[in-house]
Amino acid sequence: MQTPLIKSVLLHVALGGFLYATANIHSPAPKVMEVTLNSAIPDVDKAVSAVTVDQKQVEQKIAQLRKKEDDQKRAEDKRIRDLERRASNARKERESEARQIKKLEQQRKAKEKETAEAQAQAKKARAIEQQERAKAKQAEKQKQESENAAKAAADKRKAEEDALKKAQAERKKREAEAERKREQAMQEQMLQEQLAKEQAARSKIRQQQVVSEVDKYRALIMARIQQNLLIDEKMKNQQCRVNIRLGFNGLVTQVTSLGGDRLVCEAALRAVRMADTLPVSKDKDVFDQLKNINLTIKPEF
């Protein structure tokens, strides 16, 4: 914007000099002609729109400023052409042109002042634009940081949710495993109890069988002793208790009186020794209860 203005001022000074030099050649009285200059350049402050954060609006504003500058340049060029045309017609109007030059000089100073103010305003506008761009850049940076923080928070939340789901799945798995083991333990306990009951039942049955066998062989041993027992009327209603120890084949290894009627005890000891071998079971459990037994001998009449 400064170049057209400078050209205009220089042109006016040159025209003034030319008219002054030719003033003595043209003797007729000069005709006063008023020259209307272009209006002052619009306030730059009004021409500079506020810069927005939006880049598209910034670009649009720059385009508008460029268009306005081009329009002003074309207007200034047109004004210069008009001045040139008026200057060619005003060669004979020295006095009027001198006054016009003075006016132009005043306008030039005013233009310079206005230009300086416009430049200051433009500089201020550029500073504001830079500040706005810096703010926009900072805002974009903060936005990016916010998005990154939001993404990090979302990733963390997802990781925590995944960890929670995994922990819940593992807890359910542990609970299921614990339940399975508990059921298995209960089943094993029930099986053990059942086996114990069956074992107890078998043991009871076996014990009953052993007792029955022991009783049977006690009876057989007693019968064998009774067969060999020599009795006397003096032994009637008398008895003797003896201890007999037997080998695995029923061989009497030892017989001892545990007390009772003397005659019955002597007869009982003789009868056991005479028997030599007494009936025993091949069943070890039965034999274990017969190998060392106590018997009460009562003569039978």
Image: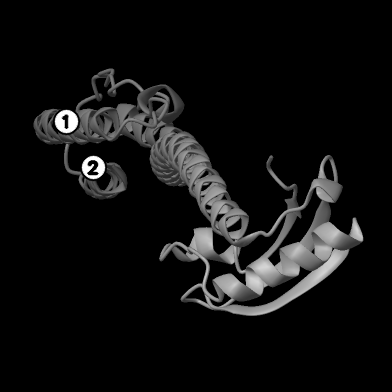
Q: Residue 149 carries which label?
A: none
Identity of the residue drawn at 52% across and 67% down:
278
Residue type, numbered disc 1: Lys
Considering the numbered disc 2 on the image, is that residue within a helix, a strand or a loop?
helix
Say which of marks 2 and 1 sits in front. Answer: 1
| Residue 281 point in image, percent of width and height | 44, 62
Q: Which of 70 and 215 is in front in this view?
A: 215
User: How far apart, in angstroms, are the residues tagged by discs 2 and 1?
Assistant: 36 Å
Q: Which residue lies furthest to the front in this view?
A: 233
Give the colouring mode of the picture: one colour
Q: Which of 48 and 300 is in front in this view?
A: 300
Q: Is residue 237 above or below residue 48?
A: below
Identity of the residue drawn at 27% across and 29% down:
61
Residue topped by disc 2: 19
| Residue 207 point in image, percent of width and height | 53, 45
Q: Nearer the viewer, residue 204 or 220?
A: 220
Q: Is residue 58 rendered to the left or right of residue 128? A: left
Q: In this view, does 288 lie above or below 136?
A: below
| Residue 172 point in image, percent of width and height | 42, 35
Q: Nearer the viewer, residue 286 or 98?
A: 286
Considering the numbered disc 1 on the image, is that residue within a helix, a strand or a loop?
helix
Q: Which image quarter is the N terminus in? A: top left
**Could you tell me how many numbered marks the image carries?**
2
Identity of the residue drawn at 43% across and 38% down:
198
Q: Is residue 253 rendered to the left or right of residue 76? A: right
Residue topped by disc 1: 67
Sequence-earlier tag: 2 or 1: 2
Identity of the residue drawn at 25% across and 32% down:
65
Q: Can residue 268 be seen in this view?
A: yes
Q: Which image quarter is the C terminus in? A: top right
Residue type, numbered disc 2: Leu
Question: How many neighbours does mark 1 have within 10 angstroms: few (below 14), some (14-19), or many (20 or more)?
Answer: few
